[in-house]
Amino acid sequence: MAEYTDPGLTSREQLRAGQLGRRIPQLLIGLFLFGWSMAMMVESDLGLMPWDVFHQGVANYLPLTFGQVVILVGALVLLLWIPLRQWPGLGTILNVVLIGLAADLGLKLMAQPEPLWAQLLLLAGGIVLNGIAGALYIGVHLGTGPRDGLSMALNRITGRSVRLLRTAVEVIVLVVGFLLGGTVGIGTVLYAVGVGPLLQLFLPIAQIDLTASE
């Protein structure tokens, strides 16, 4: 299996790299499935990924849906990119809007299961689908999501590792979200330990070779 490689393109170079007829549909599918996987984890009621604990906690205090809070927070995080001189790609902009819309659609169409085994199945499916979806939209090389881009910008400025900074940010939003009433549980732990290996598994399959001709 080929290894995942980051071409390190600027926003303009990402669009000029070609194969947009394949990359943009894959991006849209990946973002939709990412939002849908978030809804699956919410409906499992067994714990959310750190940022979603925060989103759910904030939604408890605002007259907004879960997905609308996801969009609002994504937009606010993107604004933080300006003083950090981090430039968004097409995928970054679409990420802000589409995952929130997909999450709200999923929450509208899915019902929360009652048996524990069904909740666990929904949780496991959500985590695996999240790994697949993340690989799909990262693999098109059209920009990171606003939250991941924040960690990358801080890495460029501070010189600290992206993993350390991402962990620090996620711990902060997890704690704040928990204090606001967001759901923390076994799903939070399973996501934390499982999403990395899942991305490592699916990224080499989902990434598009930008050196190949259309």
Image (spheres, rainbow, N blue to C red):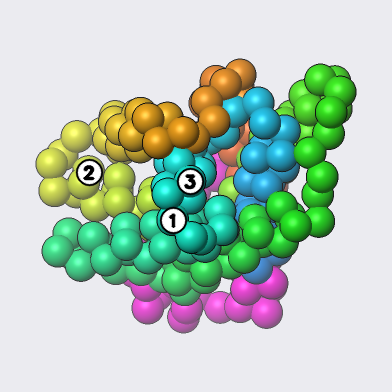
Sequence order check, earlier mark of 3 and 2: 3
**In contact (CB < 8 Å): disc 1 and disc 2:** no
Q: Percent position (x, y) of residue 32?
A: 67, 61
Judging by the rendered image, the residue that carries numbered circle 3 is 60
**In contact (CB < 8 Å): disc 3 and disc 1:** yes
Judging by the rendered image, the residue that carries numbered circle 1 is 62
Q: Percent position (x, y) of residue 150?
A: 30, 51
Which type of secondary structure does the marked residue at label 1 adopt? loop
Tell me, yes or no, whether the highlighted magenta stretch contains residue 5: yes
Identify the amino acid type marked 1: Leu
Residue beneath the point at 79% across and 38% down: 112
Residue beneath the point at 56% across and 78% down: 18
- Between residue 12 and residue 182, name the one nearer to us: 182
Mark yes or no: residue 52 visible.
Answer: yes
- Residue 155 badge: 2
Identify the amino acid type marked 2: Asn
- Residue 19 badge: none
The magenta region covers 1-26
Which type of secondary structure does the marked residue at label 3 adopt? loop
Does residue 188 lie above or below 61 as drawn? above
Which type of secondary structure does the marked residue at label 2 adopt? helix
Identify the amino acid type marked 3: Asn
- Quadrant of the rendered image containing residue 185: top right
Residues at marks 3 and 1, CA–CA distance in whole angstroms: 6 Å
